[in-house]
Each structure stands twice: as structure tokens, then as C-alpha cells.
Amino acid sequence: MKKITISKDNESKKLIRFLSTYLKEATDSFLYKMLRKKNIVLNDKKALGSEILKEGDEISIYFSDETLAKFIGSTKELNISDRRNILDKKYIIYEDENIIVINKPQGVLSQKSDNVDISINELALNYMHSNNEIDIENLSIFTPSIVNRLDRNTGGLIIFAKKYKIARKLSDMFSANKIDRYYIAYSYNLGQNIFDNKKN
């Protein structure tokens, strides 16, 4: 049996959405079936899946350890056990309990496109992991990630969100163009900038 206490970062989610994230290898139909059979309960009571989670709520999952591990997925799939590269502090412009603002160098991916790639996203996750800010189980619920991307050959600022609510809020702000983005282009032949403060 596994008991999960909902943190402030995960409140306001629907129960079924939380479960589908935590038990990512399980289908929604299977999760609904487990809820009907009371193999998964909320605050020791039968749940429908449509409940909105609040901080302090407790989800009990009555699975064997083997079944639970199967539906959560392996640690290798979470890419935490074999990470060796950590974000260098010299690239951190700002950091608090919610975000890291990173100066991404040219030639580095924002997010990996292949399993062998190293990206800013993975480097920042490693950085958090090395500071004991995340663990493997928390990654099953929410994986901290960047909220804006830059092309491999573009250097500049990237925001990395440590918490679910912050990631969602920042993503919404970027989508609604509530965060301005500025670019400076350089001519490599002339060695000078040809556009300054170009707003996107």
C-alpha cells in the first residue's frame, strides 16, 4: 500500500489527472476501475476521480510493490539515476525557491531531442537533485522543467520552474504574451550587432 499526502504544489488538480501523472503507465479506464473497486481511495473514502485535490489530502493506493513500480515506471525512464552533468553556477542569473533563470550558452539544447542529448533542462534537474531539492518519487508526480525554449544556436535567458503551480502560471503568461522577449542579432562577418532590442 502506498499513501501520498498532497502538497501545496499539487493542490487544485483533479484526482484523476494526478493519478494519471503519478501512475503514468496506467490507462484512465484502469484508474477509474481501481477507484470504483476502492483500490485507490481519497481520505479513506471512495472517490470518483473528479475531486479537486487540496493540500493535506491523502491518497491511498492498495497495490503490491511490484504493481505500483510497474505503473509508476522505472527510475531510468525518469532519467535521474544516470545523470552525471550538473548545471554550472556561472550560468545561473537568478534563483529562488520557485525558479532558476539560466543564461543558456550557444550550442546547448534547451531540451533534449534524443536520449543521449545533454540539455539545459537535464542540467538544471541534476543541479536541483544535487542540492537535495528533488527526489525520484517527486519526479513521478511533477518533473521541474524549463518554461521557454531557445534554439540550439541561440544564447539567452531561460526560466526553469521548480514547482508545478509556477510552471503552469509562467506557461500561461508566455502563451498570453504577458512576458516580453527581446533578441539581439549579431553579424559574425562584421563582429557587431545589427539589431538591438528586437521585440518578439
Image: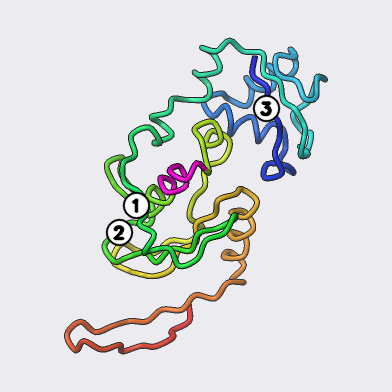
Q: What residue type is labelled 3?
A: Ile
Q: Residues within 10 Å of mark 1 (few under 14, many from 20)?
A: some
* Of callouts 2 and 3, the N-terminal one: 3
The residue wearing badge 1 is 119
Residue at image position (28%, 83%) is 186
Does 158 appear above or below 120?
A: below
Query: Which quadrant would residue 180 be assigned to in this image?
Result: bottom right
CB within 8 Å, label 1 to label 2: yes
Residue at image position (79%, 34%) is 51
SS class of the residue under badge 3?
Answer: strand
The residue wearing badge 3 is 4
Magenta: main secondary structure: helix
Asked whether, in this view, residue 188 is left or right of residue 156, the answer is: left
Q: What residue type is labelled 1?
A: Ser
Q: How crowded is mark 3: few (under 14 residues within 10 Å), some or many (20 or more)?
A: few
- Between the residue at mark 2 and the residue at mark 3, the CA separation in whole angstroms equals 37 Å
The residue wearing badge 2 is 108
Asked whether, in this view, residue 72 is left or right of residue 121, the answer is: right
Asked whether, in this view, residue 31 is left or right of residue 161, the answer is: right
Q: In which quarter of the image is the N terminus?
A: top right
Does 172 appear above or below 179?
A: above
